Amino acid sequence: MSIYRVVRAVADASGEGAVDWAAAAEAAKAATEPGSLDLTEAERAGYAADVREARDRIREVTGVGFDLPDTVEVQHRHHWIDANVETFRRVMRPLADSVGPLPGLARSVNTGSMAVSLTFLANNVLGQYDPLLLGEAADDHKLYFVHPNIGAVAASLDVDVERFRRWIAFHEVAHAAEFGAAPWLPGHLENDVEEALEALKAGSLDREALGALDTTMTAVEGYAELVMDRAFDGEYADLRAKLEARRRGRGPLTKLIRRLLGLGMKRQQYERGKRFFDAVADERGLAGAAAVWERPETLPTAEEIDDPELWLRRVPSRRA
């Protein structure tokens, strides 16, 4: 880690927008060890097999037809930063001109904040399904695995790295399944994101758009948890318990950063969404739970997520 390079990159932030994205990426990489990407042939084959077999197993168990993204990458941390700084830039584009009365100072502060976010995430993300929201029409969805983080977390949890890697693959491929089942979903999310950002640009909070986005993401995360749990071809209770213990055992600074990045809310989305889908799947099976992705109108409302019986009464069974 080079403190000088971090500070210099942020202090030299320039350009016309609210964030100097090149400087944010440079600072994040200066603060982050990339980690090794020297994979053995067995490791390379293992990633490929995990993804392929997760796809086949999830297709079989859920009845959902979907394809894997054209881009499936095993990355180190600097690769992940390079890939995701473009995602951050794309999503934040509506706020590009919002620099305030002191543009130089605001740009440095914003650039530093983004560098901190990228640094933290680069050191913690294990796998990522990227639907490329707000991207060009020709852009394909992507799937990433951050190899150094997977190895480091598996070692810290004292679990078999190959088994842990496979579990992560099932979770990320489950996301590919739901977006494959719902080709309308990226556009639906994009609309909510754009509405919320346009309101922020105007100096207000669009609580309706933010609430709709949270509800949809709760369904997205909850379905992936359900599919991973019911399709994964092995025991996983110890993996989940150890990950939860790791989250609870983090220091105060890490907890603060997670809170500022909204990662606590993400965990709540997992839990609320999983409870909803467990109830629906127990009643109608995994194929019945996939009815959520038929069209925007079959998404659960916030009230229905907390009371699945309301959704079950509103959305008829496919067998009906």
Image (cartoon, rainbow, N blue to C red):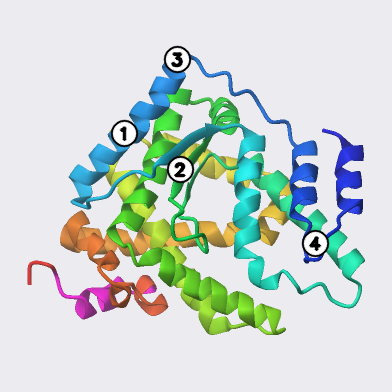
Residue type at mark 2?
Leu
Circle 1: element type: helix
Label 4 or label 1, whichever comes before in sequence order: 1
Disc 2: which residue: 143
Disc 3: which residue: 41
Q: CA distance from mark 4 to mark 1?
A: 40 Å
Instruction: Identify the residue shown where x is 20% and y is 78%.
Output: 313
The residues colored magenta run 306-317
Q: CA distance from mark 2 to mark 3?
A: 20 Å
Above or below, comparing residue 225 to residue 240 in the picture: below
Percent of width and height locating residue 234:
30, 32
Label 1 or label 2, whichever comes before in sequence order: 1
Give the quadrant of the N terminus. Answer: top right
Q: Which mark is residue 52?
A: 1
The answer to whether residue 102 shows anywhere in this view is yes
| Quarter of the view holding residue 258 | bottom right
Image position of 38 (left or right of 22): left
